[in-house]
Image (tube, rainbow, N blue to C red):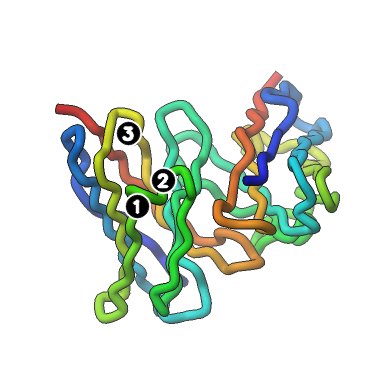
Amino acid sequence: EIVLTQSPATLSLSPGERATLSCRASQSVSSYLAWYQQKPGQAPRLLIYDASNRATGIPARFSGSGSGTDFTLTISSLEPEDFAVYYCQQRSNWPPRTFGQGTKLEIK
Amino acid sequence: QVQLQESGPGLVKPSGTLSLTCAVSGGSISSSNWWSWVRQPPGKGLEWIGEIYHSGSTNYNPSLKSRVTISVDKSKNQFSLKLSSVTAADTAVYYCARDQGGHGMDVWGQGTTVTVSS
């Protein structure tokens, strides 16, 4: 089973700042990685698929990069609505389609 | 657009079977997608349970495989989850989702809370 490790566990930033979230896989997942955003009381929302492709309707301030074992989700300039928990998910070697443990992005 | 809605009992007794259904509206369950179940224990992260294709082909999380059954009912445009021998550790919000294969889980239900307690 592929294990995904996200860092940091919590990231404290202010609106307007740049956020960089990391996801590391225990073995290569090529570019088969997705990112999701989850707000309290809501279902997750797909942000990025295949490491760098924005899902439908996702603002351009969200971008993904990486391949192999190291991936990054970048939010170029934080908006108030971006403060949430972010999960990565590998889609290369399944079952299972494992998730990372999440990064909480909180307002500083 | 496609919408998903979970339904089922919110309370299940220990050692019993959890049964949930996900109704698909605005699209056909026979489209080229996998249909998935994901759960989230209180205050914790997401756990992938398994998925089914409209042909009936399934994939399960090995950690749950002995207790999980996912099935599809094309006539009702819905799919279902059964989890047997439940314990308090199975208490969670259960989500159904559409998985576009290489494109990720792009449509989610609102989630339903299931508590395992006597």
Q: Amino acid at mark 1?
A: Val
Instruction: State the residue in front, A11 or A92.
Output: A92
- Which residue is at 20% across, 36% downward? B15
Q: Nearer the viewer, residue A39 or A33?
A: A33
Instruction: Tell me the number on the disc at residue B91.
Output: 3
In the picture of the structure, the residue carrying the numbered disc 1 is B68
Q: Check if mark 2's residue and mark 1's residue have beta carbons within 8 Å.
A: yes
Of residue A80 and residue A92, the one placed in the foreground of this image is: A92
Q: Secondary structure at mark 1?
A: strand
Q: Say which residue label 2 marks.
A: B64
Q: As drawn, is B2 to the left or to the right of A58?
A: left
Upstream in sequence: badge 3 or badge 1: 1
Q: What residue is shown at x 24% (from left), y 52% (from top)?
A: B19
Kindly identify the amino acid type of the residue bearing the numbered disc 3.
Thr
Provide residue A51's location: percent of width, then percent of height: 77, 55
Chain letter of disc 2 in the image: B
What residue sits 64% from the left and 48% below the top?
A89
Q: Residues within 10 Å of mark 2 (few under 14, many from 20)?
A: some
- Residue B100 in which image quadrant: bottom right
Rendered location of residue A59, percent (x, y): 72, 54
Inter-mark Cα distance, 3 to 1: 15 Å
Judging from the image, mark 1 belongs to the subunit labelled B
Image side of residue A27 versus residue B39, left or right: right
Question: Please, what is the three-letter code of the amino acid marked with disc 2?
Answer: Leu
Are the residues under badges 3 and 1 in a single subunit?
yes
**Residue A61 visible in the displayed image:** no
Could you give the CA–CA distance between mark 2 and mark 1, rounded to whole angstroms? Answer: 6 Å
